Amino acid sequence: MSTNIIFDIDEKKDTILDEENKKELEEIVHEFKAGHYPNVVTKARAFRGKYKKEKISAFALLVEAISLAQIGAAKESAEVISSLYHNPSGHTVDGLIELGELAFLSDYKLSRRILSEAVKRMENDIEEDRIKLARGYLVLGEAEENLEKFKRAVTYYKKGLNCFEESDKRDQYMILFLHFKLGVLHSTINKPEDAIYYLDKTIELAGEPHKDIKINSLVSIAKTYGSMEKDDKAYEYLSKAIPLLENSSLKNRMVHAEALTEMAFYYFNQSRLEEAIPYYEQAIHIYRGLTTYSARKIGMIYMQYAYCLEHKQNRNFSLAGRNYEFAVHELEKSNDRELLENALADVISFFDQRKNTKKKRYYENKFVKLTNTNADKVME
C-alpha cells in the first residue's frame, strides 16, 4: 500500500500552514518527500513540541508514524497511531479510514480494529458513498489476509466488490483485481469450484489490457484443476498461459516457473516422460535464477526430473544420478523430514542398482542419521 495514495502531505500541510511555522513545516515536507525518514521523525517531534495546537500535533504525529513505519520501527509507529486513535475528541469516518490505512503499514490488528469501527459506522448510517465503504472493506480484507484469516478476508473482499459494482462510477480495475483476489483466496481455503468461478471471471474481465492478471489467472486455474486431479482441464489452461508468458513481463518469474512445472507434472502423470523433461529443465533454470524459492518444491522437481531421466526410452543414468543428488541437497533445507526420508530411500535404491557402493553408503549414512535424529526426538 503506497503512502502517496493514503496520505497527501501537501493537503495536510495547507491546513496548518502559517507565517510562524512555514519554514519548519516546509522542511518537514521536503524531508518526507525525499524519503529522509529519520530526519522527519526528529523534526516532527521538535515541531509538535514547539507548537501546541491540536491540528499541528496531529499532523506531526501522522508524519512521524509513517516515517517510523518506513524505517522499520513498526512497534513505535503503531503506538503513535494508537495514541491518535484514542483521542478523546473522537474521529470522523474519514479520519478513521485514514488512521486505519496508516496503521496497515505497521500493525494489521490495529488497522483491523480501527477500520472495523469505520465500516460499522458507515453500515449503520447506510453510507451513500459506496467507494468510501469499499475502501474500508478492501483494507480490512488486506489486513485479514496478512493475518492469515483467509475466510474473513474473503467476506470483506466480497463486500468491497459489491460496493464497486453498485457504484455509479464503476472502477473496472478494482472489480477485476477483487475477482482475482477472491479466486486465489478461495483456492487457499480449499474451495476449488469458487476459485475457478472467480478466476474465469477475471480472465473475461482482463482481456488484453491486463495481460499479467490474465496469465496469473490462467496458471492459478490450471493449478486448481491439477489439485483436483483433472489433468485435461489443467492442460487446457496451461496451453493458453505458457505461450502468453513467453512474450510478457512475467517471463522467467515465479508464475512462469509454476506454469512450466505444472505442465511437466501433467506429462509426468501421463507417463510421457520425454515430453515432461524439457518443461522440468526450463522450470529448474527459472527457479535457480529467482532470489527466493521453495527448497521443498524444487527438491520434488529434481526428484521427478531425475526419475524421467532414469526411466525414459534413452536413459541417462549419469544425469539422473546428479539430479537425485541435487534433490537431496534441496530437501535437506526443507522442514519435511518424511519427504526427505522417502527421497533418500529412492536415491539409495538408485545407486544400489547402478552398483555405486560409495554413493550408496554415503546416502545410507544420511538416512541413518536422519532416522536416529527422529527417534531421539520421539524419545524426548
Image (spheres, rainbow, N blue to C red):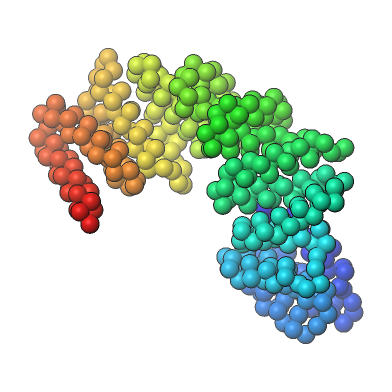
Q: What number of labels is visible?
A: 0
Q: Is residue 296 above or below residue 216?
A: below
Residue at (26, 29) in percent of width and height: 319
Q: Is residue 132 above or below residue 347?
A: below
Foreground: 223 or 322? 223
**Residue 144: percent from the left, percent from the top?**
61, 50
**Residue 361: percent from the left, percent from the top?**
11, 40
Residue at (12, 32) in percent of width and height: 356
Foreground: 162 or 15? 162
Q: Quadrant of residue 5?
A: bottom right
Q: Is residue 1 left or right of residue 188?
A: right
Residue at (80, 55) in percent of width and height: 121
- Most extreme residue toward the front is 124
Q: Is residue 263 left or right of residue 47?
A: left
Q: Is residue 127 left or right of residue 160?
A: right
- Most extreme residue toward the bottom is 50
Q: Quadrant of residue 66?
A: bottom right
Residue at (22, 37) in percent of width and height: 344
Foreground: 205 or 230? 230
Q: Is residue 314 above or below residue 144?
A: above
Q: Quadrant of residue 324?
A: top left
**Residue 80: percent from the left, percent from the top?**
67, 71
**Residue 183: percent from the left, percent from the top?**
61, 33
Answer whether residue 142 is visible to the viewer in this image.
yes
Answer whether residue 216 is visible to the viewer in this image.
no
For the C terminus, the image quarter is: bottom left
Q: Is residue 112 left or right of residue 52?
A: left
Q: Is residue 220 above or below residue 237?
A: below
